[in-house]
């Protein structure tokens, strides 16, 4: 539908969004992953594009479909592929939103042939993936960098620590134990916290509406940083 001019608040901005889970292969039939539908990140990409931004969406495996003239979608599978893609596009971006649920660990060995089951328990040795957001925080120049935090306890305290540790401008804190919030559903409830300590509670709403509110808050912070 027709966009009204005053809603095009991200015109001229390059927005980089990562969404969805990553998949870390164990063997040809098995993988290790995180719970994430990709809906929140895809909604952010769509709302940003509708607000006039040119959007690059780096997406892990997701069922969500997206078609938009101003969205370039790059499909990735692993945390390492997401890392490469995000670093490649970071320099040309004004606003970066890391909504993806990146696997913190991957199998240290990937088997070429299907593992056959054996008697007794199985141990899979896991190694750490790289922290993409941390790397972006270290390289940050004029960009506005937004992370997500998925927490099941002390969400604000844990989210604040992540904001500081990763040198973010803002963080969207998801209390995944709250009703209607989190993964598969079409709704979410979050807290937006910026580096100056301002917190905004965005109550239960559709992921589209939460995305709109998040981008409005980011826009306000970007404008405040410029002046
Ligand atoms: N993240 C990332 N690369 C990773 C792990 C996480 O870029 N290897 C990003 C996520 O995309 C998110 C933010 O870091 O924007 C926070 O993710 P979260 O899982 O909540 O925090 P972690 O730092 O991984 O800490 P933990 O899982 O131990 O709480
Ligand atoms: Ca994690």
Image (cartoon, helix red, strand yellow):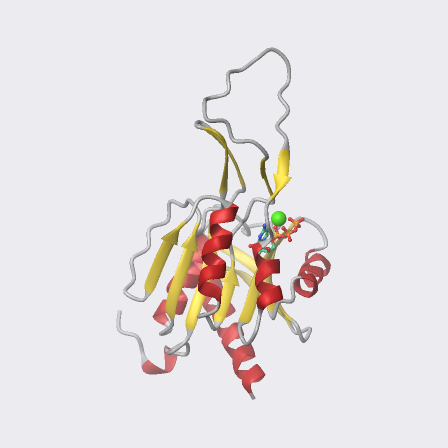
Place of residue 176 in the rendered image (x, y in percent of width and height, measured from the top left): 60, 49
Residue in the foreground of this view, choosing between 197 and 186: 197
Residue in the picture at 48% in, 69% down: 91
Q: Does 7 appear above or below 76?
A: below
Percent from the top left, x then y, of residue 115?
Answer: 50, 20
Asked if residue 33 is positioned above or below residue 118 in the image, the reply reads: below
Q: Is residue 168 visible?
A: yes
Q: Nearer the viewer, residue 122 or 47?
A: 122
Q: Residue 208 falls in which quadrant of the image?
A: bottom left
Q: Quadrant of the N terminus?
A: bottom left
- In this rendered view, identify the residue nearer to me: 85 or 183: 85
Quarter of the image with the C terminus in it: bottom right
In the picture as drawn, the residue positioned furthest to the bottom comes out as 227
Q: What residue is rendered at 71% in x and 57% in y? A: 158
Indicate the position of residue 173 as horizontal and vertical percent values. 61, 59
- In the image, farthest residue toward the top: 119
Residue situated in front as seen by the camera: 35 or 200: 35
Could you tell me which residue is drawn at 49 percent across and 63 percent down? 210
Q: Is residue 192 visible?
A: no
Judge left or right: residue 30 versus residue 54.
right
- Image location (x, y in percent) of residue 144: 54, 72
């Amino acid at each position: 539908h027709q966009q009204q001019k005053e809603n095009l608040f991200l015109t001229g901005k390059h927005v980089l969004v990562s969404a969805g889970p990553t998949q870390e292969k164990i063997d040809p039939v098995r993988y290790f992953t995180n719970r994430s539908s990709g809906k929140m990140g895809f909604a952010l990409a769509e709302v940003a594009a509708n607000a006039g931004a040119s959007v690059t969406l780096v997406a892990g495996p997701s069922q969500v479909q997206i078609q938009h003239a101003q969205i370039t979608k790059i499909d990735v599978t692993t945390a390492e592929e997401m890392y490469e893609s995000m670093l490649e596009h970071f320099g040309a971006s004004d606003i970066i939103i890391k909504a993806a649920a990146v696997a913190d660990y991957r199998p240290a060995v990937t088997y070429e042939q299907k593992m056959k089951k054996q008697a007794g328990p199985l141990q899979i040795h896991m190694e750490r993936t790289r922290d993409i957001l941390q790397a972006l925080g270290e390289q940050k120049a004029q960009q506005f960098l937004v992370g997500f935090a998925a927490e099941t306890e002390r969400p604000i305290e844990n989210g604040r620590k992540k904001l500081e540790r990763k040198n973010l401008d803002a963080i969207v804190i998801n209390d995944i134990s709250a009703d209607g919030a989190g993964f598969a559903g079409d709704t979410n409830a979050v807290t937006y916290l910026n580096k100056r300590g301002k917190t905004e509670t965005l109550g239960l709403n559709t992921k589209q509406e939460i995305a709109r509110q998040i981008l409005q808050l980011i826009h306000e912070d970007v404008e405040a940083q410029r002046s």
